Image (cartoon, grey):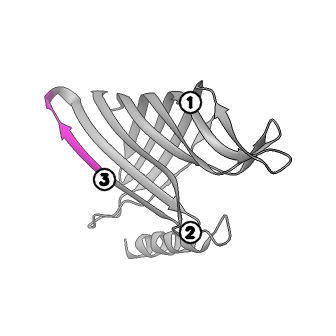
Amino acid sequence: MKRKGIIILVLCTLASVLSAQEHAAALWTSLSVKKQFEKGASLQVYGEYRCKDNYTSTDLFFLRFTAGYKFCPYLSGALSYDFFGSQQGKSVRDGISINPWMKNSHRMLVDLTGAYKYKDWSFTLRERYVMAYAMPATVAGADSLGMYTDYDFAPGLSHVFRSCPTVSYHIPDTRFSPYVSVEFYN
């Protein structure tokens, strides 16, 4: 037990020294309230906020309402609604340089999750379908001559399919369960 715990602690510590970007101190926080009912049903409210660029700008935020159901010990499903906002960086469209802006969307999510547990190890695979409606927006920008102008983003509908396998290990005699997860989307 001691040896496994030390190995897991070292791996978790090493992950904290890896970085994907420079000068990118960020904060990621969430709050969740969940109510379990008999026969496997649940309701959940979940909020998340992420900031980036050394805590100076919002990266994304969302508020999610979820109804879930556990069909059997190995399979569960959920239907969720999000109000979602994400930071869009500077870009050029139709010859107009557009300033950073928040893209707000309404999203519907349908999840199916398979789970398998072997001793202290857990394996899950979540398959998620996301349908998002991006709200129209008018964003300040400048044309090629440097004159101030607005750019109108039309509303848009998008569909994304996401797969998320996760492997976790519950360290015996503790409350800790480190995990490794990756999400693929199309």
- Along the horizontal axis of the image, is 88 left or right of 144? left
- Position of residue 21 relative to residue 63, above or below, is below
- Along the horizontal axis of the image, is 80 left or right of 156? left
Residue under label 1: 136
Q: Residue 144 at x, y = what percent?
A: 85, 46
For residue 160, which quarter of the picture? top right
Residue in the picture at 52% in, 30% down = 135
Residue under label 2: 15
Q: Nearer the viewer, mark 1 or mark 2?
A: 1
Q: Residues within 10 Å of mark 2 (few under 14, many from 20)?
A: few
Residue under label 3: 31
Label 1 to label 2, Cα distance in Å?
A: 39 Å
Front-most of residues 23 and 134: 134
Residue 35 colored in magenta in the image:
yes
The N terminus: image quadrant? bottom left
Label 3 to label 2, Cα distance in Å?
A: 24 Å
Q: Residue 71 at x, y = what percent?
A: 29, 24
Residue in the picture at 61% in, 68% down = 24
Q: Residue 124 at x, y = what percent?
A: 44, 40
Of all residues shown, which one is farthest toward the left? 38
Kindly tell me whether residue 153 is visible in this rendering: yes
